[in-house]
Image (cartoon, helix red, strand yellow):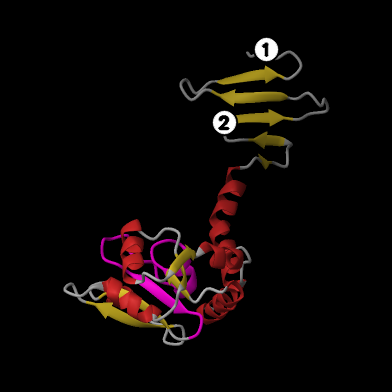
Amino acid sequence: MHAERLDRVRAAMSEQGVEVLLLSVGPDLPWLIGYEAMPLERLTMLVVPADGEATLVVPRLEAPRVVEHPDVFTIDPWNETEDPIARVAAHCGPAVRLAIGDRTWSRFLVDLQSALPTASFGKASDVTAPLRSIKDDAEIDALRRAGEPASFATSAMGSSVSSHGTTSNTSGCATTRGASSRGTTRCASPARGSTSIVSRSSGIAS
């Protein structure tokens, strides 16, 4: 699944002339590799060259959270005393046309612009958004499973009709339909436990 998505991303990058895609916090990263970056001051960034191996630059303390997919990306953990911006810049190589995640922290973008002074930065969503708008089989299945509890709850809360023609609803009222289409509605009073009868024809409660 993730390998196929990465292939689609690379094809879109080639079409748009993007040499390197950079993804950090936000929905694009978990969609592409299955890992969601923690919104912390420590940089986590996936570097995806149009040609070459994708690399996830991640703090060493957070690296154990990453589920590895060797066929999709490699992991480059950095220590507290190291510069993650320099790591990312090194993985970008001589690329000058980059696309960076829309929700990347501005401080990291500013540092990357300093580390890669000849590079121009565009929006990663120009690459990923058209691809993500077309759901693959895994996403369709996830949406279907996510909707099952809501569908069940909606069904359970709906009106139920008995064999005697009485319809009950969540308000505690029951409508009895006889030969007349008008019928009557019986509502139990939660405070007194009594029952009032409302005629549909007169609207008078007793």
Q: Is 91 located above or below residue 171 in the figure? A: below
Tell me the residue that label 1 is attached to.
204
| Quarter of the image that includes the N terminus | bottom right
User: Where on the picture, by quarter, is residue 44?
Assistant: bottom left
**Residue 38 coordinates in the image, percent (x, y):** 32, 63
146 up-or-down from 49: above or below: above
Left or right, residue 166 beside residue 56: right
Instruction: Name the residue rendered at 70%, 14% in the picture.
Output: 203
Q: Residues within 10 Å of mark 1 (few under 14, many from 20)?
A: few
Mark before the other along the chain sequence, 1 or 2: 2
- Residue 195, horizontal then vertical, whole percent: 57, 21
Q: Amino acid at mark 1?
A: Ile
- Location of residue 142 (image quadrant): bottom right
Give the percent coordinates (x, y) of residue 113. Answer: 36, 65
Residue depicted at x 69% and y 41%: 162
- SS for tag 1? loop
Q: Identify the element where label 2 is drawn.
A: loop
Q: Residue at x 48, y 25 (%)?
A: 190
Q: Nearer the viewer, residue 40 or 101?
A: 101
Q: In this picture, which residue range is highlighted in magenta?
A: 23-51
Label 2 sits on residue: 172
Of 147 and 94, nearer the camera is 94
Horizontal side of residue 72 vs 145, given as left or right: left
Q: Is residue 142 visible?
A: no
The foreground one among 51 and 153 is 51
